[in-house]
Image (tube, rainbow, N blue to C red):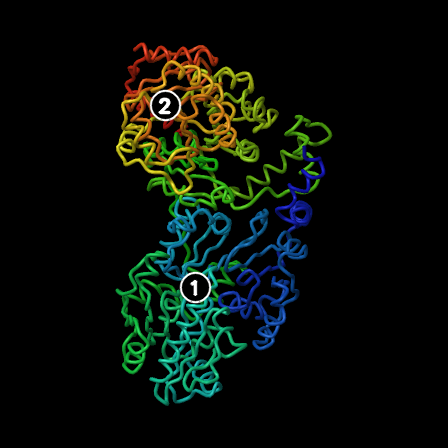
Amino acid sequence: MPSFISKVKKKLKSGAWYPFYNTFYEKVPVDKKEILLVSRSGLALESNILAILKELNQPEYKEFYKVLAVQKNKKEQIQKKLERYGISVDKFVYTREPSYYYHLAKAGWLINDTTFPGRYIKKDGQTYLNVWHGTPLKRMGQDNPEERYDTGNVMRNLLQSDYLVFPNLYMEEKMSGAYNLKELYQGTVLHEGYPRNCIFFHPEQGTKLKELLGYAGTQLSIYMPTFRGTSSSVQEEDYVNQIKDYLNRVDILLHENQIMLVKLHPFVQSQLTLDSYHHIRLFPEGYDTYEVLNACDVLITDYSSVMYDFAVTGRRILLFAYDLEYYQGSRGMYEDISDYPFPLVRTPEELVKELNTDSGHPDDAFLQKYCTFEQTNATRNICHHVLLGEKICKSTSMPGTKKKKVLIYTGSLLPNGITTAFYSLIHHLDPSSCEYYIVFRTHSIKDHPEKLNNIPEGYHFYPLATEMNLDILTAAAQILYMNWGITAFGIGKRLDHAYKREWKKHFGCISFDHAVHYDGYGNYMIALFSYAPCKKSIWAHNDMEMEITKKHNVSRPLLQKAYSTYDHVIPVGEDIRGAAERIGGHPEKIQVISNYMDLDLIRSKSEKPLIFDKNTESTVSIEKLQEILNSSDRKFINVGRFSPEKGHERLIRAFDRFWVNHPDTWLIIIGGMGNLYTSTCELAASVKSSSHIILIKYMSNPFPVVKACDFFLLSSYYEGQVLVVPEADILGVPAAACDVNGARAFIRQYGGTLLPNSEDGLVQGMEMFVEGKIHTMHVDYEKRNQDILSKCEKLFME
């Protein structure tokens, strides 16, 4: 049993500075004369933040105290850049250190081009300006299946911002959809140019720099590709070798009056030596990217957003997209760049050929779409508008929605009955009646983001990126409360304050209409949703009294409070209503809504070929299983995770007794989650009937097996509202269950067979089946499903 101290340490492990930040957040007053700026999470000083800092060195901002957050190992490099441009700041702070979190809590003005850390909570009195770092071509946020599980902190930062800068209508459209801004964002959208692009309206400065760098009289191009490396060093090495080959071929073909600057990802740059080239030069050190771009005649890129910025110059853009199809397939893009008015080339030879023409100038349609609001005074306008209160920028608001906004917490989407019920429900709800936001915790999905692929179009994603902002006292208070229900000595008050703070961290800038804890488990999420300032409902998918007693997987004090705090408690079966009433003590809040049964999906999956998944473990080969299923032998089946409450031990012992007189019978058990597979295999191997018992640890599609069997036996000690019995019934397989909560009400209602809740009862059921006394039930599943949907939609619309 973990000690009290070890539990506290574990709670704090996820963030060393949480204790400091909580204190700063609570105690440090907001200073409206302080500005905290962060560029690329402190890794550099460039782009929009550099342009804004230049503006903030003008006399009209002299009363502001400017704090720049940098990563410690980048300070010297950033300091040199400040000196080059004659920019001063009042203070440096290092990211990930207490001073950074102090100023994050203190600064009245926050300016960022990416995100603040996940523990950041916007305080009353702070104004947050986010100048995102580029117009997206690659799919982002919830538009990108590969990363949508991990977009929570980006979404949270954008939604908390008071001002967002969108330099073109295309960017506004894509960012709005990718991060739920269209319906949820409450701040102001500035239709203003990017600060970094103001320099492009001063071509004379580019000409001077070109001369200073020694490239006057040449065609100066710059190659800025997107990095394609991965975590695989082999692939990275292949990519570096490919770039070397391309540069070698380009250098040979360029003319004497042509110079190509190269700006690559630092990893690639460190692997290349350019000294031997005649026409290719490294990007000049110490200069800002956009200052050098302004000196160039041609931009060569592929999928980088820099093309949208450079287009405002009217100068040439060439797309060296030698791996276009692969990149489109692996990363996903909003648009087909082959439709752009820029030559798209695949080889170094084609690239140099285009350099020797006058092709690639942006046309009016491109400029209108991607450079809509660019102009020379953008930086000044933004700073005067936001910091000085002069409303000179064109601005707009997001349209929002008139529909109800409903949060639904899914849990971890583990392969179990709750997840099956959830997927079935959301595939049949009408997403046009409400805006549904599917909430999950990033850490619980990150290893298998493909779980989200089962969520249909029309739903939004709302990942929660961080763990709880804990300090030592709050961690201790939480343990005392969760384990023993202690609320005295300020414990209850401290936890109330902590969870209100957590709600504000995740959702504080948004007004939802209904928060639904569909999973029904997870102490943190049960507590968090109980502080939602809107209607609240929590599902009960199981007999939670038994879960608490047998598995200790939920805090009883917490669940008691939740069931009395939420507006609705939703057991999925009449059998478990009593447990919910006893826990919560408010029978008037309880409404039974059964689980939706996806008839078409169950039937269609049962017709698919029998396959084992990559991670399937089984006591027989798939060929042997198919042979048994095709045979005339009698086949009994059970589907349920290898967990104590499923009663597999008594099922095996009952089958062993039955098999003595019926040796032409097989027992097949298909599991899922649960940690008893190994011990169940050991038990099965020890009985006389072991040669006729098949155990399968997991199958993503067990329905072909279920359909091929003769009789379904539910051996559980308790259930919520059992799904596997009606699934078998839908497939025409007779079923019987022990007379337990979660199975009793459904089977009684539809004329099924209940058995004594014992090993003897299971043996009795097997004999009854042989005698022809167990049949399929008489259920109008279509009507039942319509009633379930009607109840859910009425609940959500409250």
Identity of the residue furthest to the right in this view: 489
Q: Between marks 2 and 1, how big is the CA–CA gap?
A: 50 Å
Which quadrant holds residue 715?
top left
Amino acid carrying mark 2 in the image: Trp
Residue 450: where, in percent of width, then height?
40, 44
Mark 2 or mark 1: which is in front?
2
Does residue 510 lie above or below 753 as drawn?
below
Judging depth in this view, the residue of 404 and 574 nearest the camera is 574
* Residue 53 disc label: none
Judging depth in this view, the residue of 722 and 97 nearest the camera is 722
Q: Check disc 1 and report the residue beneath it.
A: 235
Amino acid carrying mark 1 in the image: Gln
**Secondary element type, mark 2:** strand
Q: Residue at x 34, y 63 (%)?
A: 370
Q: Check disc 2 and report the residue beneath it.
A: 666
**Which quadrant of the figure contains the C terminus?**
top left
Does residue 626 lie above or below 90 as drawn?
above
Residue 523: where, in percent of width, then height?
57, 32
Q: Residue at x 64, y 41 (%)?
A: 11
Does residue 610 lie above or below 101 as drawn?
above
Residue 65: where, in percent of width, then height?
64, 63
